[in-house]
Amino acid sequence: MAQDGAEMAAGTAEGYASHDGVEHSGFNIHPMDQFVVQPFFSDGPVGMFTVTNATVWMALAVLCTVLLLVVTTRGRNVVPTRAQSMAELSYGFVYKMVHDVTGRDGIKYFPYVMTLFMFIVMANLLALIPTSFAPTSHIAVTAVLALLVFFGVTILGFVKHGMGFLGLFWVSEAPLILRPVLALIELISYFVRPVSHSIRLAGNIMAGHAVLKVFAGFAGALGLFAFVPVLAITAIYALEVLVAFIQAYVFVMLTCVYLKDALHPSH
């Protein structure tokens, strides 16, 4: 009798334990496992030159961008195909954004802004494929993109205006006594830009995919009642498709705003 009780207790404890030895009192759902960077072709540690899942999906995002913007538009058909129409709509959308925010002076930087938009939106959309990987959910990726923008616009500002670029931090319309305080606030907010720029994108993508994984775990555990979380997954998935575009738009819009500050720094 005592032996049976011990076996039952052991079985119960085993059922509440996850694969990593952490005890749980509910479903064994690990929504953050999907964000682990690991070797793509083998097992083992990740080294400096290891091809990882993040590397592969970023390369696929670049490949899809080239296919859409270069290959599908090579014919330049008068009556465009669907793919060519998508490429032309993307081009016109980003071009208008750059022109409206930065003015005529910013048009020469349009290729870089367009590259940022297409890479982010392609990476976000590819990450919605089941068993894929979301590289834009990692700060290591979004921080590099944000720092490139930050250093790029800062160098551009000093190259074009010299020390006059510091006028960006001097609020000449404010009362004289407040100008030093406002200059300090502006300076701090300027250096916080790459932090907010990168965390906004990574945080939104990570949160959405984590929620999808949680509801997918519920669907796998509820049996006959799985239709409830499946309906939720369908709604969230549709929302994530929208978020993929919105986050790319927000990232590029902020890039255009920072570029405008570099081109026209005075308040």
Image (spheres, rainbow, N blue to C red):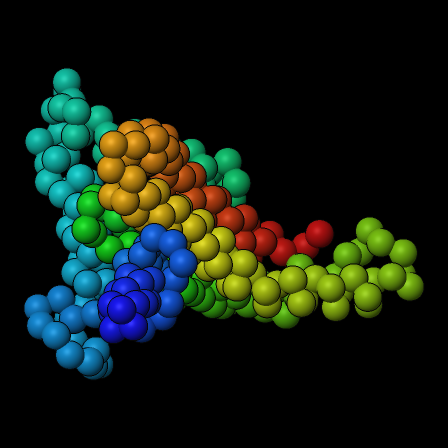
* Residue nearest the observer in this picture, 27 or 77: 27
Nearer to me, 193 or 240: 240
The image quadrant that residue 140 belongs to is bottom left
Image position, residue 89 (x, y; %): 30, 29
Residue lying farthest front?
1
Q: Position of residue 186 (x, y in %)?
A: 70, 62
Instruction: Give the image location of residue 168, x and y in percent.
Output: 67, 59
- Residue 190 pos. (x, y %): 61, 63
Residue positioned 34% across, 35% down in the render: 229
Name the residue located 80 percent from the left edge and 56 percent from the top edge.
172
Between 217 and 176, which is closer to the camera in this rendering? 217
| Residue 10 in which image quadrant | bottom left
Q: Is residue 122 visible?
A: no
Looking at the rendering, in which quadrant would you find the N terminus? bottom left
143 over 132 or under it: above or below: below
Residue 57 appears anywhere in the view: yes
Residue under the image location 8 percent in, 68 percent down: 41
**Residue 219 left/right relative to 76:** right
Residue 120 falls left or right of residue 164 = left
Q: Is residue 18 left or right of residue 169?
A: left
Across the whole image, how many numbered discs are drawn on residues? Answer: 0
At 12% from the left and 74% from the top, the residue drawn is 43
